[in-house]
């Protein structure tokens, strides 16, 4: 049996561990314990360790490609709406959408995603957003994320506009109380206040676009992921949304923006990531890589 002194010593170490754990969590640290004993290991957050908010190490993403029932013909990448390289074996076909992607995106980086259609830009954005998980390798994104990837992404057709806003904000990491506080401003910005109790499926595509945009841009994210969504709705709303986007671009710690317009990329970005067949071809200074890309596309 344990002696009283041994018991008190163990209790003291356990109490010390729990207090340190709570203190670390409140300071934004992650805590783990070593199996060898009550050893406290504090892993500092990315800001304290000066780690990149986005870090990918040999990340690959592979999809099983279906065949048509009648002919057994393999569905092409174009039909599958995903870029990458098609890999066929005797019994299976796979689409390698992302292939061994390794890169670090640091705080302050505004990254322009460039490449032809099917190069893997949208797939990479969805990987960074957490919609996909890598088949192999790692993808670490630290901080609050906000995404403008497609109209209605993550919204429920049966739920009301009001319910969709609350749900989306909680998925972004906001508390239910904070979501309710943001609700009136979001509906007002989207010009949908009077339709707040309507089911989403009864709304037009323009209304859905405005709602999705207003929700995604209502929070100040650490990491902002944008895919060609530089406006929604009519000219009036597009002007209003562009101003709101510009502020978010400036406030975000990291921006990853996919767009075909060089003028937009030059306005908001300082680096470029050139994707080709699911691989990183170049990553670095925006002006240098845009010139290289333009030259390659003109051949």
Image: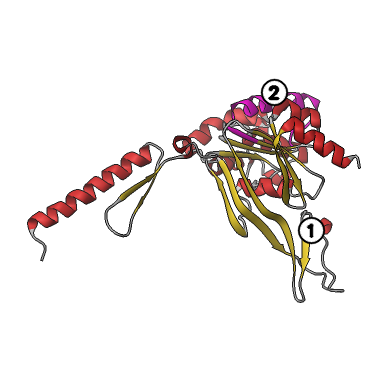
Query: Would you name the residue on which mark 1 appears?
Result: 80
CA distance for labels 1 and 2: 35 Å
Q: Which residues are magenta?
A: 229-255
Secondary structure under tag 2 reads helix
Closer-to-camera residue (161/118): 118
Q: Is residue 59 visible to us here?
A: yes
Q: Position of residue 17 (x, y in %)?
A: 27, 47
What residue is disc 2 on?
A: 243
Which percent across, then down, holds residue 47? 48, 35
State how many labels appear. Answer: 2
Res 222 quadrant in image: top right
Residue 220 magenta = no
191 or 144, nearer to the observer: 144
Q: Residue at x 72, y 56 (%)?
A: 97
Q: Residue at x 83, y 61 (%)?
A: 76
User: Residue at the spot x=70%, y=50% of the render?
Assistant: 123
Compared with 78, 214 (above or below) is above
Q: Is residue 232 visible?
A: no
The answer to whether 254 appears left or right of 62 in the picture is left
Res 35 → quadrant: bottom left
Q: Quadrant of the C terminus?
A: top right
Image disc number at residue 130: none
Query: Which of the two discs, 1 and 2, labels the residue nearer the N terminus?
Result: 1
Q: Is residue 231 magenta?
A: yes
Label 2 Cα neighbours within 10 Å, binned few <14 / some 14-19 / many ≥20: few
Q: Main secondary structure of the magenta part?
A: helix
Residue 137 horizontal/vertical position (percent): 59, 56
């Amino acid at each position: 049996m344990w002696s009283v002194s041994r018991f008190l010593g163990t209790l003291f170490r356990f109490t010390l561990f729990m207090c340190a754990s709570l203190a670390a969590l409140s300071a934004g640290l992650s805590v783990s314990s070593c199996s060898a004993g009550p050893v406290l290991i504090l892993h500092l957050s990315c800001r304290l360790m000066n780690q990149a908010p986005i870090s990918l190490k040999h990340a690959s993403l592979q999809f099983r490609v279906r065949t048509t029932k009648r002919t057994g013909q393999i569905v092409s990448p174009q039909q599958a709406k995903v870029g990458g390289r098609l890999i066929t074996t005797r019994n299976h076909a796979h689409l390698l959408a992302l292939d061994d992607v390794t890169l670090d995106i640091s705080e302050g980086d505004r990254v322009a995603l460039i490449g032809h259609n099917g190069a893997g830009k949208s797939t990479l954005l969805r990987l960074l957003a957490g919609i996909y998980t890598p088949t192999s390798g790692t993808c670490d994104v630290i901080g609050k994320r906000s995404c403008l990837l497609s109209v209605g992404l993550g919204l429920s057709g049966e739920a009301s506009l009001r319910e969709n806003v609350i749900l989306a904000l909680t998925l972004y990491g906001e508390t239910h109380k904070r979501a309710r506080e943001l609700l009136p401003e979001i509906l007002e910005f989207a010009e949908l206040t009077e339709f707040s109790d309507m089911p989403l499926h009864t709304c037009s595509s323009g209304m859905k676009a405005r709602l999705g945009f207003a929700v995604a841009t209502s929070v100040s994210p650490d990491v902002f992921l944008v895919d060609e969504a530089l406006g929604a709705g009519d000219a009036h709303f597009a002007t209003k949304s562009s101003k709101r986007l510009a502020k978010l671009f400036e406030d975000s710690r990291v921006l990853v923006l996919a767009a075909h317009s060089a003028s937009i990329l030059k306005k908001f970005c300082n680096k470029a990531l050139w994707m080709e067949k699911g691989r990183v071809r170049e990553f670095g200074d925006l002006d240098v890589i845009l010139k290289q890309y333009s030259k390659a596309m003109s051949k």
